Amino acid sequence: MGSAEMCRDLAPEIERLLKASNSYIKKKAALCAVHIVRKIPELGELFTPSAHSLLSDKNHGVLHGAVVLITELCERNPGNLDEFRKAVPELVQIMKGLVTSGYSPEHNVAGISDPFLQVRVLRLLRILGRNNDEASDAMNDLLAQVATNTDSSKTAGSAVLYETVLTIMDIKSESGLRVLAVNILGRFLLNNDRNIRYISMTSLQKIVQTDHTAVQRHRGTIVDCLKDQDASVKRRALELSLALVSAANIRSMMKELLRFLSTCPPELRSHATSGIFNAAERYAPSQRWHIDTILHVLITAGGDVRDETVPNLIQLISVASELHCYTVHKLYRALISDISQQSLVQVACWCIGEYGDLLLKGDCDEIEPMQVEKIPNDVLDVLETILQSHMSSPTSRGFALTAIMKLSTRITNNIESVVSIYGSCIDVELQQRAVEYNALFKKYDHMRYLIMSSHTIINTTSNSTSSSVQENLLDLLGGLEPTPVGFNSVTCLCVFSAPNVTVYEKGGVNLKLQCDNQTETAITVTFTASNSTQSDITSFTLQAAVPKSVQLQMKAPSGDVIPAQGRGTVTQTILLNNPNKASLKMRVRLSYTSQGTLCQDMVQIDSFPSPAWN
């Protein structure tokens, strides 16, 4: 309670009392000195010599005060560490005396001799042994003795063992001693006291990266803690379980994590799904296993996944061409069973729209055949149900409408009437899509097949995946529209007869065009994008449109990330068929993210190399 001025005035007197003959006075003086050092750290030098001498006292109260004072002096001033490391042998002897002493009624707590003093000494040894080989070597044998001889059946013994474990892990201890420490924490996991289980997992979480193999030995016990009734213990068990996933145990651990996901509390679902996705992406043994795992999560907890899950899964599915049939059938089955999980609905709609032809065949070698009499009608019914359901989000409805539109190239049913209904929808975005799709039927029907049957126009790198077919495409097909707010200006140019021509260069992004003859009426146009900035360009996409008389087919891009400083490129190949050999024009829209900022720009190419049509 004393002020800083009072502490300064009385500090010399307190230092004198540390040398008193009365143990009780020395104990009180030591504790007073602790508070003085906390208030005025620079006065610590005054107490350093006396603090060291107190370690030779036999009174436990004095020893306790001395250890606390030395701990405070070392923490307040690291310069004192070298001075007090000389006292490590004395501290080791004090600790050995406590561990090997017989029963003492005065100091015994549940069979442990003065556990309060033991904990204080171990904490001080940890501070002195940190980053010091000599001090660590001096205490290794003691720590092994404490770890093996202390009874953990009582809370007092557990406290001493826990402090021993922390000391072993913090100093430069031997590898065998660290394994012993991990095993102690493993035993703690079986303790009936949930607080002990909690601190055990908290400690294991801190060391799992450095002592991964030792912690792995207790994987079964840790996984069992996922069933604990205590929410805090369950959360720690989840974090530790996710940290233990490796390429060697991914299948068995994922079974346990997926089982936990089906029953875990709502507040843990988001964390669980995120961890499962990260583990699956890192250690997936195959693409099919990866897709199955994510679909399982979407079916179980689709409402708790991160926003980027949908585009990430779409990207994964799109590159696994050999699994398209299997995936679209599996997603369709899931959609029939449940349309409440919006992430699942969105991925399923995208997949049906893209690979509906594989679904309409009605069979798949890798999945049990569906007993459906009228598959096209059934598929449309499911998509219409999503459009009409009160459970569907606006985004999900957009995916469903786009899927129906994509199916218009494969199904002869009256899809145009279904799409037109939503031209007056109260949802403005859905209304806009319906109007644009109707325009494709009425104004650009000759191009509808090329536009809606292409798998690569879909932008799978953003959350607006389902809308990227129509987004800005009709603008490209029509006349020049005013540049939207936030867009870069339009660049118009002519491409001359050259093997590789730069058609766009702005903000460090460079786009080159190259034309190659295929037949008399067909050429291949290749765009190559590079990046000279200091950071990667992400979410890079190209959209292109040509006059009505020219047919356009876009191939899959080589990627969507342009490495910084010209360390790599992204290429996009476009096949053009010009049966009338008309003068060719093309409008290209670029979209990419640079240093967190979305950039969009447009390039109009007014002429191509004439040899391309010769």
Image (cartoon, grey):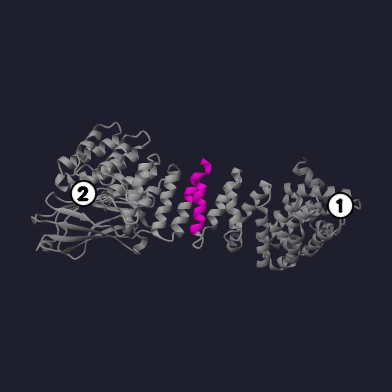
Say whether residue 261 is magenta: yes
Where residue 137 sits, quadrant-wise, is bottom right
Dominant SS of magenta comes to: helix
The residues colored magenta run 250-275
When asked about the image quadrant of residue 339, the answer is top left
Camera-near label (2 vs 1) is 2
Quarter of the figure that contains the C terminus: bottom left
Numbered label attached to residue 230: none
- Residue 460 visible to the viewer: no
Crowd rating for badge 2 (residues with CA inside 10 Å; few <14, some 14–19, many 20+): many
Residue 16 marker: 1
Which residue is pictured at 28% across the width and 42% down the height? 378
C-alpha span from label 2 to label 1: 92 Å
Q: Can you see residue 490? A: yes
Instruction: Give the amino acid at mark 1.
Output: Arg
Residue hosting label 2? 451
- Given the current orientation, which residue lies at the most extreme right position? 21
Tell me the SS state at disc 2: helix
x%, y% of residue 193? Answer: 69, 47
The residue nearer to you, when weighing 52 against 247, is: 247
